[in-house]
Amino acid sequence: DGIDLDADAYSALLSITSSADFLTMEKARERLSSVNLPADPVESSENSELHVSDDSKTHLLRVFMLFMEMKNSGLQPDRVAYNSLMHACASAGDSKRAVKVLASMRSQGIDPDVVSYTSLMRACCVEGNLDRAFDVLQALQNDGLVASNLTYVTLIGGCLRAGDVERALELLETIELDFTHLLPLYQVVVEHSCSSGNIFEAVDILKRMQSAGVRPNPELLSQVALIAREQGLHEISNKLFYVANIKKPENNSERNELHV
């Protein structure tokens, strides 16, 4: 038989379930077994569109069912519960449902936070709707919220998934963050180009980083240099290694400048 859960317990269980790794879903099922949820997804008029074979959709269905059980028990979901459902929507790339969840939050007097908007943005990116993802960023800012590093990583990842490196770079050039926060964001884009084997694009990004006042660190330069060497681009590789090894420039004119 099931056990009685209060609102905090449901929110905690929703958070655990929504963030569970698909490879360890058996553990999630064990935790859920005491909440009287069926072991397998079932269809109903409310959630039939979620009944698909993909793991992420199945996962969303389970989170949605737990969320509905919480409401049917007469308990009011809090922001943690709603954000857990938003997270599951994001993993499934279900932006339509994520928008409905966001609207439901507002109707219950719960203002979406950065986590809510980032999940909606991720849902848009997963389904390939990049324009809508950028609209979500604008909505976040219009609500007076400050985007987190995860927000930007999500949007940049969406750009790269869509093959739009230029849009990712344009976004980076508009972000008002300090060097320590911008560097890892640029690194994501550089590493994407490297993984695609496009060394010339990677070098161009390094130059744009420098123009934006974000100096590539030796580790990133060396990473690109190694790939350039593997491709037989020894001149580029040697120059990158040389720049990476300049530890302490004596004056501004000797800063790590890329002339590749």
Image (tube, rainbow, N blue to C red):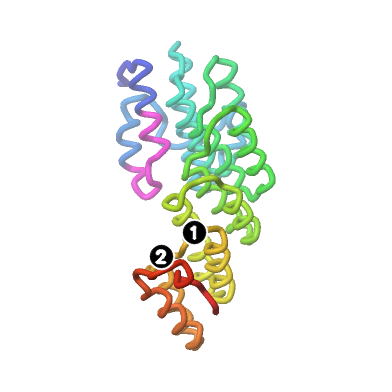
Q: Residue at x 38, y 41 (%)?
A: 20
Whether residue 42 appears in this view of the structure is no
Can you see residue 64?
yes
Which of these two is toward me, 200 or 60? 200
Q: Count the marks: how many? A: 2
- Give the residue at x 54% y 31%: 145
Q: Residue furthest right?
A: 131
Which label sits on residue 23?
none
Give the main secondary structure of the magenta stretch. helix
Left or right of 142 on screen, residue 87 = left
The N terminus, quarter of image: top left
Residue 206 in the image: state x and y as whole percent: 52, 67
Name the secondary structure under disc 2.
loop
248 in relation to 52, above or below = below
- What whole-number distance in Å separates the C-alpha atoms at marks 1 and 2? 9 Å
Q: Which residues are magenta?
A: 13-26
The residue that mark 2 highlights is 217
Say above or below: 258 vs 62: below
- The secondary structure type at the circle numbered 1 is loop
Instruction: Report the residue at 42% width, 52% height from top.
Output: 180
Residue situated in front as seen by the camera: 98 or 200: 200
Under mark 2, the amino acid is Asn
Expressed as whole percent of the image width and height from the top left, the position of residue 51 reads: 56, 39
Pointer 1: residues within 10 angstroms few (<14), some, or many (20+)? some
The kind of residue tagged 1 is: Val
Horizontal arrangement in the rendering, residue 241 relative to residue 172 (left or right) = left
Dot 2, crowdedness within 10 Å: few (<14), some or many (≥20)?
A: some
* Location of mark 1 (residue): 214
Q: Position of residue 112 (x, y in %)?
A: 53, 26
Q: Quadrant of residue 52?
A: top right
